[in-house]
Image: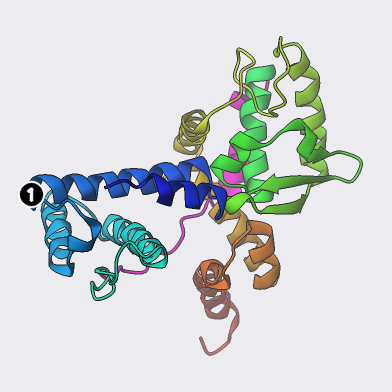
Amino acid sequence: MSIEPFLNYLKDEKRYSSLTLLAYKKDLEQFLTYCGTINDIRNFGDVTPKIIREWVMMKMSEGWTVTTVRRKLSSLRTFFRFLMKEGVVKEDPTEIVVMPKTGRRLPVFVPDYQMDIMLDAEELQGGFHELRDRLVLLMAYYTGMRRSELVGLKLRDIDFSGKSIVVTGKGNKQRLLPLADELVEDMKCYMELREGIVSREHGYFFVTDKGQPVYDKFIYRLVEKYLGMFTTLSKKSPHVLRHTFATQLLNNGACIEAIRELLGHADLSATQVYTHNSFESLIKVFNQAHPRA
């Protein structure tokens, strides 16, 4: 049972990123291993809803979270719909498998005063290393870029004269983001120091101390380190800075449609979760300002 035609479809026609393709590949290989070893299934058409449910139950007993289950089932659902489209199977066994419900979690964000303390800290003042680290934090906070977008940012994407950058997001969709003056100045300083670090130009904007392009874990560890030093948050990841960007915009009057565009969300519902954080701020203002509150 080969999944290569499906992966090629996602890559060539849907233009999914390499990380997304890897996630689909891992999900499907896990399921097919289960089918082959536990149920001796050799054809996609022999997969039943019962087999899928039993697989999910077994994995949940091993520690899978509801979020993980939903993602795995979503991968299977997309895969079997592709097989139906290609005529490989006549029925979709995932169609009657119900997705488990998740509790709604509000995005975690960094308060204004903690962001100011972090960005002005002595630990982020100095040479190339410190300037690079500060710029990663600053760019995530000022633009709401995803970790993969920070990693993939290239020199050619930056327009200093127009104070903007072109960001390539999920599905290779591009969006134009404005750059604040503070960010532009730091980027120019960084570029001057970067020239002395990079011995052989590769075109990527953010580089390690050895001049090589940064990678996902590099960005994650960097953000985790400084959020751990200067905030009291339990969750410390690059996505927290993306949440902070969106929450601050909404709290300061930006319309949700504009925020959706800046974040690169395809669906407005993905952006609307930030309205809950904004509503908490409104309640606080109401309680402080209304004479009958």
Label 1 SS: helix
Q: Nearer the viewer, residue 271 or 236?
A: 271
Q: In the picture, residue 140 is in which quadrant? A: top right
Q: Is residue 110 magenta?
A: yes
Q: Is residue 176 magenta?
A: no
Q: Is residue 163 above or below residue 262?
A: above
Q: In the picture, residue 198 is in which quadrant? A: top right
On the image, the x and y values in percent for residue 275 come to 54, 72
Left or right: 156 as drawn, with respect to 288:
right
**Looking at the image, can residue 231 be seen?**
no
For the residue carrying disc 1, how many other residues have a C-alpha within 10 Å: few (<14), some (14-19), or many (20+)? few
Left or right: 106 as drawn, with respect to 61:
right
On the image, the x and y values in percent for residue 47 come to 19, 61
Q: Is residue 84 above or below residue 199?
A: below
Q: How many marks?
A: 1
Assign the magenta stretch its main secondary structure. loop
Q: Nearer the viewer, residue 276 or 32?
A: 32
Q: Nearer the viewer, residue 191 or 15?
A: 15
Q: Is residue 225 above or below residue 290?
A: above
Q: Is residue 56 above or below residue 36?
A: below
Residue at the location (36% across, 58% down)? 79
Q: Amino acid at mark 1?
A: Ile
Residue at the location (15% across, 51% down)? 35
Residue, disc 1: 38
On the image, the x and y values in percent for residue 224 come to 46, 36
**Magenta region:** 100-127
**Looking at the image, can residue 160 be seen?**
yes
